[in-house]
Amino acid sequence: LSLITLLLWGLYGFFGKMATKYIDPKSIVLYYSAGAALVGVLLFIFGFRFQVHPIGSTFALLTGLCGVVGSILFIFAVNKGKVSIITPMIALYPIITITLAYFILKEPITIKQGIGIIFAITSIILVSI
């Protein structure tokens, strides 16, 4: 599943940049939303049952909001800049997740993760030069 996600997110960045060559970012956002709605409809068609929990649903909504707003900002960024620089920078988002997990969830950061974070930041500096 991780490799499929890697592939899909790689295509997401590429397709987003290609779309900016033909339509404006606001139109892309509407198509993106239509794609998300289609996935939602397919889930229900294939028997998905909706769960509700006050805390879980709140975090799920926050996940969706962050994802959609991040996607919108990504499209605007690749419309103005090089996808080859913007995409690796955005790919550093696990650093935010790891840091929040460390401070809020009290999950330890291993030495390997710490070294990986340093290498990831270094890679962005090298890619953007």
Image (cartoon, rainbow, N blue to C red):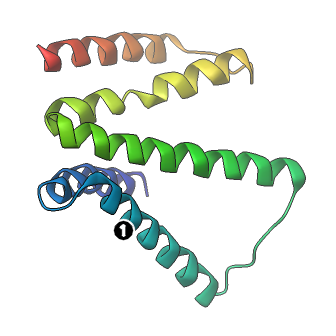
- The residue at which mark 1 appears reads as 31
The answer to which of 89 and 25 lies nearer the viewer is 25
Residue 76, image quadrant: top left
Specify few, some or many for label 1: CA neighbours under 10 Å numbering under 14, 14-19, or 20 or more: few
Q: Position of residue 80 (x, y in %)?
A: 19, 36
Question: Is 51 situated above or below 74?
Answer: below
The residue shown at (33%, 51%) is 9
What is the secondary structure assignment of the residue under circle 1?
Answer: helix
Task: Tell me which residue sits at (73%, 45%) in the image.
Answer: 59
Amino acid type, mark 1: Tyr
- Above or below: residue 108 compared with residue 84: above
In the displayed structure image, the side of residue 1 where residue 108 appears, left or right: right
In the image as oriented, which residue stretches furthest toward the right?
54
What is the x, y in percent for residue 116? Answer: 38, 17
Decide which of 65, 115 is in the foreground and name it. Answer: 65
Q: Residue at x 19, y 52 (%)?
A: 14
